[in-house]
Image (tube, grey):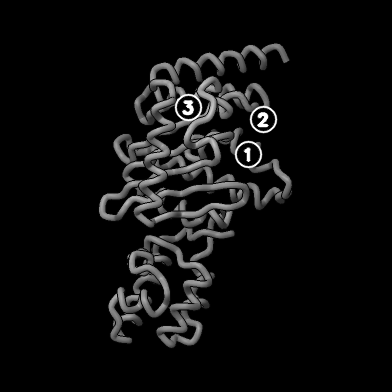
Amino acid sequence: MAIEDNPESRTKYGEELRAKREAAGFTQEELSQRAVMSRTHIAHIEAGRRRPDVADARRLDGVLGTGGFFERFLPTLDGRKVAEHFAEALEFEGQATVIRDYAAKLVPGILQTEAYAREVLSSGAFPKSGEERDRMLSTRLARAHVLSNFHSPVVWSLLDEAVLRRCIGGAAVMCEQLRHIVALGESRRIRLHVLPFDTGFHALLEGIVSLMWFEALPPIAYVEGLRTGRVWELPSVVRECQVAYDHALGDALSHRKSLALIRSVAEDYEHEAQQQ
């Protein structure tokens, strides 16, 4: 359940892999075939863009004859805490030039306020210690740093109306959270679209998805369910996710109308908090 918090460690891991691959006389394509890994995945690891998992490391050790070197190297990459299934997606999120996400029930991580995120991480069927929760909270709040550059990444956020109506942490927490989203939308830092309840069924109703584009890499799609998640790089699957997103976007409110709805719901929460 850990993810690399030190880019230098990933870079070193990639350099070691490249050196040992070249010493063995393999191209990336040849290594990918022997290790049953995609060439793109190997290229990401060598460039320090992706953290390999245990299975990756064992396959590399087996093909390159490195006696467990790459598996033993893995703990040096461990740092920030996130759900294991999201670790790979977080790596990509920090490199993306365009992010388009859909949230079905909760505010997307990069848009969460501290109070909202703390409530989400404090709840659930699997209790966390205060220390573990704080580590995960720190990671989640750090994700918002991708918004510090006004121009990149370009972020579109497609929210189901349930995200606005589900009261997480109480009325005051929700009021603060929604006004934070409104501020980002009003500044044009993000583009917002809400899928209202009266839309009924839409193309993304069954799960959440995050689409990412990069300057020098093919686009990817991250899809997630209960305690599961997967990064898709296969072009046909990524395209299917993009088409589904476009269909749902066509059913959503405009940016202006979405902001108006979120403001209205925030005001309702404010009145509720004042009465408590």
The residue drawn where x is 50% and y is 69% is 76
Quarter of the image containing the C terminus?
top right
The residue drawn where x is 70% and y is 11% is 275
* Residue bearing mark 3: 181
Place residue 272 in its image quadrant.
Answer: top right
**Residue farthest along the left direction in this orientation:** 216
| Mark positioned earlier in the residue sequence (2 or 1) | 1
* Residue bearing mark 1: 118
- Left or right of 198 in this view: 154: left
Q: Are marks 2 and 3 in contact (CB under 8 Å)?
A: no
- Structural distance between the alpha carbons of marks 3 and 1: 17 Å
Foreground: disc 3 or disc 1: 3
- Percent x, y for residue 249? 40, 30
The residue drawn where x is 45% and y is 20% is 258
Which of the pair 121/202 is nearer the observer?
202
Q: Are marks 2 and 1 in contact (CB under 8 Å)?
A: yes
Q: Within 10 angstroms of label 1, few (less than 14), some, or many (20 or more) residues?
A: some
Is 66 rendered above or below residue 214? Answer: below
Quarter of the image containing the N terminus?
bottom right
- Percent x, y for residue 142? 48, 45
* Residue bearing mark 2: 169
